[in-house]
Amino acid sequence: MGTDTGFYDIKEEVEKVQDNLDEHIADINNPHQVKTTVPEQYTGSDCSGSDGAANRVLTLANTTLSSEELVFVDGFCYRKDTHYTVSHKASDTTITFTGIIYDDQNIDVRYEA
């Protein structure tokens, strides 16, 4: 009896994994649902303001940034409205860091296009 239960549990797990894979394949085959993640890489020296100052502004290359952006500074994921704010204008998109940013810090911005 114990082996039948173990076999059943494994079979059930395999079916769940297969269903999950089927959903992902359906998403991939539907180009309207596939989104591209665009990375932009900067350093703190790309921001306006002085090295080690707060409220430095980074102007992004993309003007159609979605609300799904992710911002990493030296590998740490920053929180919108806590660590930075975003401003969308007709000519550009800017990120204002609320804390201190140094020129040698790596900044990685990712968003869906």
Image: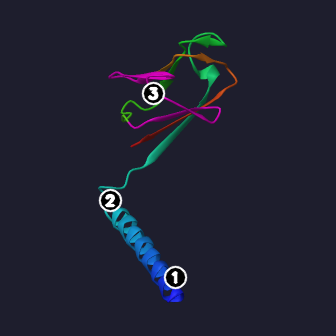
Q: Position of residue 62 (x, y in %)?
A: 43, 32
Q: Is residue 103 left or right of residue 39?
A: right
Tell me, for residue 80, which label it has, or none: 3
Magenta stretch: give its range. Answer: 68-94
Q: Give the vertical position of 86 relative to 68 (above or below).
A: above
Location of residue 17 by image quarter: bottom left
Work out how far the residue at label 1 is from the one at label 2, CA to CA, in angstroms: 39 Å
Location of residue 94 by image quarter: top left
At 58% from the left and 10% from the top, the residue drawn is: 49
Q: Amino acid at mark 2?
A: Pro
Q: Amino acid at mark 3?
A: Lys
Label 2: which residue?
31
Of the 4 image quadrants, the one containing the C terminus is: top left
User: Label 3 neighbourhood size at 10 Å, few (<14), some (14-19), many (20+)?
Assistant: some
Q: Earlier in the sequence, mark 1 or mark 2?
A: 1
Work out how far the residue at label 1 is from the one at label 3, CA to CA, in angstroms: 46 Å
Q: Amino acid at mark 1?
A: Gly
Q: Position of residue 53 (x, y in %)?
A: 62, 10
Work out how far the residue at label 2 is from the one at label 3, CA to CA, in angstroms: 29 Å
Q: Is residue 82 left or right of residue 89?
A: right
Q: Is residue 104 left or right of residue 95?
A: right
Tell me, for residue 6, which label it has, or none: 1
Q: Nearer the viewer, residue 16 or 32?
A: 16
Q: Nearer the viewer, residue 89 or 8?
A: 8
User: Label 1 neighbourhood size at 10 Å, few (<14), some (14-19), many (20+)?
Assistant: few
* Label 2 element class: loop
Q: Position of residue 29 (x, y in %)?
A: 34, 66
